[in-house]
Image: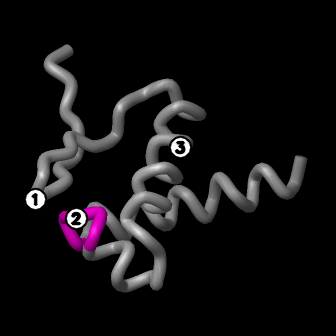
Amino acid sequence: MIIAHIRDTEDLILFVHTVELGSLSGAARDLCMSPAVVSYRIQRLENYLEFHLLNRTTKHCLLYTSDA
């Protein structure tokens, strides 16, 4: 479905922006969204990809690295 692909692309852009800024709240502030919405959309992307993308702490988000 084209709508799903657009939403997935927007979630991917949101993910990249979050990584660049290093925080969910920073990305949320920049994009005029609540941190909860940013977190939900990144979690939705992780569920879609079936892979954790971010290690979340109370202060920062770091790219998830696999030990494999």
Highlighted range, magenta: 21-25
Viewer-proximal residue among 27 and 49: 27
State the residue at coordinates (63%, 59%).
9
Please report contact status of discs 2 and 1: CB closer than 8 Å, yes or no. Answer: yes
Viewer-proximal residue among 37 and 61: 37
State the residue at coordinates (28%, 70%).
25
Given the image, on which type of amino acid does mark 1 rest? Lys
Q: In this view, does 7 lie above or below 29?
A: above
Given the image, on which type of amino acid does mark 3 rest? Leu
Which labelled disc corresponds to residue 59? 1
Residue at image mark 3: 45
Q: Real-space Cα distance between discs 3 and 1?
A: 21 Å
Residue 54 shown left or right of residue 11 in the figure = left
- Secondary structure mostly seen in magenta is helix
Colour mode? one colour
State the residue at coordinates (60%, 64%).
10
Q: Earlier in the sequence, mark 2 or mark 1?
A: 2
Q: Residues within 10 Å of mark 3 (few under 14, many from 20)?
A: many
